[in-house]
């Protein structure tokens, strides 16, 4: 085993590399994103009725299309209007797709306990989908709500975010045994 093998393991046997499946998966995702961007009220053409939407902390988990609409799509629309979805990159392999991007929107309704400010914000996100039978069966999502809240004047980290290390305002802690481990490691 080379050092590269440890960092870049082989994909399991049977991994789906079929370009036609990948193209079909991407088509499903792009149609869904176009519908969201157009403000569509019907997502049934894009998601299985019993699909699972799993978000990071603050976003929740939605089981089924009704829960997705009631507990994600409508609250997001209520909090943020004049939305412009900007997917920056897709990665697709067989029935799996992922992307990262952001939504530019106006804070026009209640969000995380904050009254509307009228500010334009950027809402960074990453999505991971599994598409079966031409519709989305699973959707894992990471939406950077702390970044959105920071744009609205709320620091959820109360000054303790690690960006303070990047700016040189705080010294990053190190494990107590870091210096000893470095001395014991052969060059």
Image: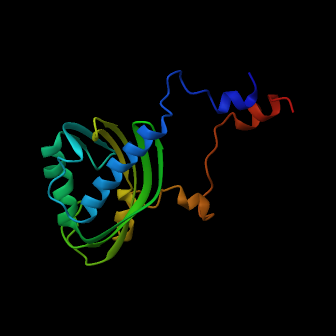
Q: Nearer the viewer, residue 87 or 123?
A: 87
Report x, y in % for residue 156.
37, 58
74 sits left or right of 164 in the view: left
Residue at x-position 61% and y-position 51%: 172
Report x, y in % for residue 54.
30, 41
Report x, y in % for residue 136.
28, 41
66 sits left or right of 61 in the view: left
Instruction: Find residue 101 and report its image quarter.
Output: bottom left
Residue at x-position 28% and y-position 53%: 32
Q: Nearer the viewer, residue 155 or 107?
A: 107
Q: Is residue 163 above or below residue 180?
A: below
Q: How is the image coloured?
A: rainbow
- Which quarter shows the C terminus? top right
Number of numbered markers:
0
- Which quarter shows the N terminus? top right
Furthest residue toward right: 187
Q: Nearer the viewer, residue 115 or 160?
A: 115
Q: Nearer the viewer, residue 122 or 153?
A: 122
Residue at x-position 35% and y-position 54%: 30
Residue at x-position 24% and y-position 66%: 38
Q: Is residue 26 above or below residue 156?
A: above
Furthest residue toward bottom: 118
Q: Is residue 93 above or below residue 148?
A: above
Report x, y in % for residue 73.
20, 55
């Amino acid at each position: 085993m080379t050092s590269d093998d440890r960092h870049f393991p082989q994909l399991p046997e049977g991994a789906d590399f079929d370009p036609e499946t990948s193209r079909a998966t991407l088509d499903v995702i792009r149609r869904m994103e176009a519908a969201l961007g157009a403000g569509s009220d019907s997502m049934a053409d894009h998601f299985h009725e019993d699909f699972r939407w799993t978000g990071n902390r603050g976003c929740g988990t939605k089981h089924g299309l009704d829960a997705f609409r009631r507990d994600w799509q409508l609250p997001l629309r209520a909090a943020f209007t004049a939305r412009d979805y900007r997917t920056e990159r897709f990665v697709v392999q067989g029935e799996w797709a992922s992307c990262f991007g952001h939504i530019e929107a106006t804070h026009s309704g209640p969000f995380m306990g904050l009254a509307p400010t009228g500010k334009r914000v950027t809402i960074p996100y990453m999505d991971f989908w599994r598409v079966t039978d031409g519709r989305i069966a699973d959707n894992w999502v990471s939406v950077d709500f702390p970044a959105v809240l920071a744009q609205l004047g709320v620091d959820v980290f109360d000054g303790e975010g690690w960006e303070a290390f990047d700016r040189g305002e705080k010294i990053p802690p190190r494990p107590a045994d870091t210096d000893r481990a470095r001395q014991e490691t052969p060059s």
